[in-house]
Amino acid sequence: MTALVQLINVTKDYGSFRALSDVNLMIQPGITGLLGPNGAGKSTLIKVLLGLVRITFGDGHVLGFPIRTAADQIRTHIGYMPEDDCYVHGLTGIETMQVAAQLSRFPATEALRRGHEILDFCGMGQERYRPVETYSTGMRQKLRFAMAIVHDPKLLILDEPTSGLDPEEREAMLNRIRILARQFGKSVLLCTHILPDVQVVCDSVVILAAGSVRVSDTLEELCRVPNPSMTVTLSGDRDAYRERLNAKGVNSEIISLRQLRVFGDADALNEPLWSAATESGCLVRGVSPSRNSLEQIFLSAVREVTHANS
Amino acid sequence: MPIHNLGYREWNGELRSPSTRWLVVAEIGIRRAWQSAWLRRMMFFAWVPGIVMGFMIFIYEQSAKQDGEVQDMMSAGAMALVTHESPDVIFRRIQQERILTGSRPSIGEARHLFWSALLQILFRRSQPFLLIPIVAVIAPPMISQDFRSRAFLLYFSRPMTKVQYIVGKAVTIGLYLSFVTMFPGLLLYFIGVLLSPDISVLYATWDLPLRVILASLLIVVPCTMLSLMLSSLTTESRYASFSWFAIWIFGHLTYVVIRSVASPGDSSMVQSLSLFETFNDLSSWILDPKLGVTHMETRLILITVLTAVCTAVLYRRVSAPMQV
């Protein structure tokens, strides 16, 4: 499979500040989540992919075009939804869509028709005839998404597409992203802080921290735990329960105040889990196969950087 | 197949040429500026002087057929408005020249003199007073509002270069300024041609439309770049408006103050401080080189440097949001 994005040792400096440091990255077609704490270099990475800033060192390709020399071709095939508002003051929603399509070289009439079509897809009704300044946060969000897809791009870069949306709209937005990716073969780079969104729609994840890539893999691979284990939810004396398990030769680790990860096969753990509960006087409220949560993966990736810096 | 498909559809149509992108920016600018009622009113008044002067050409052409003295009086009146001299003095001078040379000048020469005097009045006395407020209405929000609403992301996340963006914005302002400089001047010329008794007028005045275009460009290009630069320096368009007015008013006031204390010989250099005087002299020099305007090289260099600096600053400012 040809990589959608390939970056080799990409470094970007703003004066003395290094925003990206030796980034090596390969993004495959599909939906990829781009995660990272504030100041991790996500926005700079997006600008590099769009060819908006010149990289200091390194090289790379986006959609097969070299990032150093073919910014125009790259931007022709990318749809970018910025996190912040971006509109031309004084225009209505449909006029803004027409302008966005015309800037992507659509003929004027075709741009208007396409604008209406995409606004229909995004669930925008008659409010499209109102000036954009009067739109609510959710409506602006939908308009930005519509502007990003109006020219039928191959790759979509979405910066916080669900922030500020109510649960219903959020679900609808994620559904649209899914439709574009699964039914129309669009590739999506989803940059967000909302980890459940990534967990729900993404195929793979890239975690950036302090300007470098900490994690880059498929979501399935990342969530898989190395050894078989079960997560036990308890009420009662957790430490006493853990002692009983140790006495039975079962290893465990603490996840939270009421949760333990118990290592071993589900069949082998069946008897010791219940007997240890009886002996320690604890109540087992739930047992499920352990999976690494995205939150854990994210936090451990970010903590590594924090520890290294301190 | 559903009659109205609300789903997503791929697009495989034919795209326009990449060289037309600046046209989209210009089209937005023109459409948005035209929403201002003040601009529409000013544009209406911009054509009035041209029409009034067209009427004066009509009277001139009628008098030319009958009485040479009326013709001379009209020429003297028009010249007086350009040179600040008394019409009586100019009229007497013309009459003396007639007596000394013993012959009347050809109708072609007299017509050229009168028409170019009218064009100078248009460029010096009426249009600058419209040009300054028109730019103050349309130019300040042009880039500053794009910065505030982050519209530059809409433009530059697509295959558009900064040069195309600047050209699109400049064409918007340039077009509106041409409506108060170039087009009324050309209208005045064509009214004159239409009202003239014979086609020989084209032979006598063929250079005037070219001079009008050149004089307009010398005003429009620096004004456009200066106003766009001011707009790019702030996200508050009112600051750009204030700066625009300040440059014109304080420049002219400084010139007036220095002229009143300096010796008369220095005044033409000092005039460069006032954009108003600089553009007036440039347009007069182009429309009638015989007027004897001095220090034109200095003023041309000044205007060229001003335009170049404004363009450089503008390009840098337009690139700036991407560097953050």
Image (tube, helix red, strand yellow):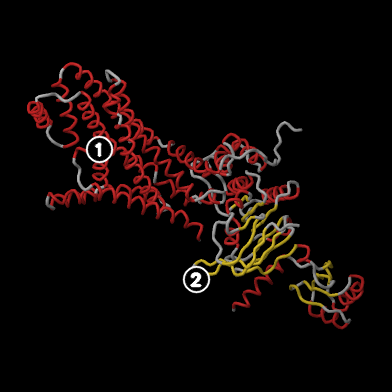
- Say which amino acid is labelled 1: Arg
Q: Is residue A145 placed above or below B3 in the rendered structure?
A: below
Is residue B45 in view? Answer: no
Q: In this view, does B254 lie to the left or right of A74?
A: left
Is residue A29 in view? Answer: yes
Q: Tag 2's secondary structure?
A: loop
- Quarter of the image for the N terminus of chain A: give it: bottom right
Image location (x, y in percent) of residue B3: 72, 31
Q: Which of the pair A309/A253 is nearer the observer? A: A309
Pointers 1 and 2 within a single chain: no
The residue that disc 2 covers is A16
The residue that disc 1 covers is B124
What chain is tagged by disc 2? A
Q: Which mark is residue B316?
A: none
Image location (x, y in percent) of residue A227: 83, 73
Q: In which quarter of the image is residue A60?
A: bottom right
Question: What's the residue at 65%, 47% (across, down)?
Answer: A153
Image location (x, y in percent) of residue B284: 24, 39
- Say which amino acid is labelled 2: Ser
Badge 1 crowding class, 10 Å Cα cut-off, few under 14, some 14 to 19, many 20 or more, is many
Question: What's the residue at 64%, 66% (across, down)?
Answer: A8
Question: What's the residue at 39%, 35% (across, down)?
Answer: B37
Q: In which quarter of the image is residue B4?
A: top right
